[in-house]
Amino acid sequence: MNTAIFAVARRRGVTLVHDPATGLTHRAARDLPGGRVSLRPDEVTSWPTVAPRDHEEDVPISVCWSPLVRCNLSCPHCLDDKEIREQSPAERVRIAELIGSAGVMGVDLSGGEPLLLGGLDVLADILTAAGCVVSVTTNGWHLRRRAPALTSHLDAVRVSLDGPTARLHDAWRGEGSFERAVDGVQAAVAAGLRVQIQTVLMASTCRNAQRLVDLAAGLGAGGVTFLQMLPIGEGRRLAHQEMIPDETAAELIQTLSVPRPLTVRMRAREDAGGFTVIRADGQIWRNDHPAASISTLRPLTATGDLALTGPDGSA
C-alpha cells in the first residue's frame, strides 16, 4: 500500500497527523492541508509521536468508542464492563454526530464486538463525513463476511490475536477463534483495508511475540501493536498474575526482528494515560496516569463533555 488516509489538523501551531491503523498521533515534519489526507504510511511513521498525556487541548485527538457491549466471545482479559446498557440506534447516531462536530481526529470503534452491529457503516460514514479517520477493533470472527462491504466506510481494521497458533490463541478466546481471525485478516487485506494486528502483552503470552510478528508479516498486515495489559474491566481479575512491567515489555520489543515493511509498536500503560473512552451506555471517561484506574465517568451529552481536563472531570 503506497498511500493511506490519515487525519490532519493544526493544533496550537503544530500540524498533527493521526494514524487510524496504529492509533498513534504524529507531529508532521512538513506543511500539510487539514482534513482527511492521503499520505505514505512509511513517511508518517518516521515522524515523532504525541502521546494523549501530552495533549493540552480540551478536545482529545482521538477516542475509543464502544457502541455496543455484545460479543460472541468471552475473553478473560477484556477491558469492557459487560453489565452496562447499550444505547438505541438513534442515540448512537447522536454520539457519532457529537464526536464529529467536536473536532476529534480519530475514532476507533470497539466493543464488545463491533462487527455484530448492523449500523456500523452508518456510524462510520457520519464520522468520516466530519473529517475523522475511523478504525474498527475486532476479534475477527465476522471479518471475512463484512470486510468487502465495509472497505468503503473504514480507514483501518485492528484485529486482536493472543497467539500465533490456534492452540495458543483459542486458549484465551475459544475454539475456532484463531482460524476465523486469520481468515478475516486475509479477507480484509484482499479487500484493500489497512490491517493492524493487536495483542495484549501478558506474562503467559509474551514469549510468543516474535512468532506473532512473523505471522502478521505473512498475512500481509501493516503492523503489530503490543498493548500493555490494563487493570480495567474484566481484566482486573487477571492483572495480578498477568501484568508485566513496562520496562520488561520494552526490552522484549527491542529484541524482535521486524521484516519490512511491517512496523511494530508497544503501547505502555503510561502511554494509555489520558486516553478518552466512550462506553456503550454513552458515558465517557479519561484514563488516569498511568492508565491503572478511571477517575472520571459522566454522560456524554454535549461537545463540552469531551473536555475531561482535570482528575475530577472539571474542564
Image (spheres, rainbow, N blue to C red):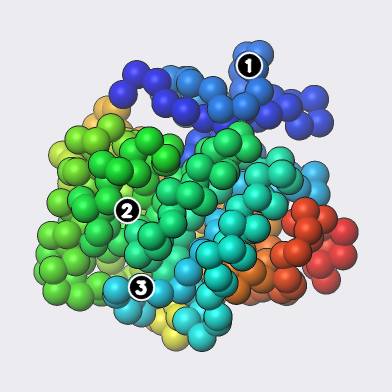
Query: Which quarter of the picture shows residue 64?
Result: bottom right
Bin the neighbour count of mark 1 within 10 Å (Cα to Cα): few under 14, some 14-19, many 20 and up: some
Q: Earlier in the sequence, mark 2 or mark 1?
A: 1
Q: Residue at x 27, y 28 (%)?
A: 260
Residue 187 rendering spot, x and y as whole percentages: 19, 43
Can residue 274 be seen?
yes
Please name whichever residue, 41 or 92, is drawn nearer the observer in this view of the structure: 92
Q: Residue at x 65, y 58 (%)?
A: 94
Q: Which mark is residue 32?
A: 1
Query: Which quarter of the picture shows residue 113?
Result: bottom left
Element at label 2: strand
Q: Earlier in the sequence, mark 3 or mark 1?
A: 1
Can residue 243 be seen?
no
Indicate the amino acid at tag 1: Leu
- The residue carrying mark 2 is 159
- The residue carrying mark 3 is 71
Residue 199 rendering spot, x and y as whole percentages: 34, 58
Element at label 1: loop
- Answer left or right for 279 relative to 203: right
Circle 2/circle 1 CB separation < 8 Å: no
Q: Is residue 18 above or below residue 13?
A: below
> Which quadrant is home to the C terminus?
bottom right
Bin the neighbour count of mark 2 within 10 Å (Cα to Cα): few under 14, some 14-19, many 20 and up: many
Element at label 3: loop
Q: Earlier in the sequence, mark 3 or mark 2?
A: 3
Q: Residue at x 46, y 73 (%)?
A: 69
Residue 32 rendering spot, x and y as whole percentages: 63, 16
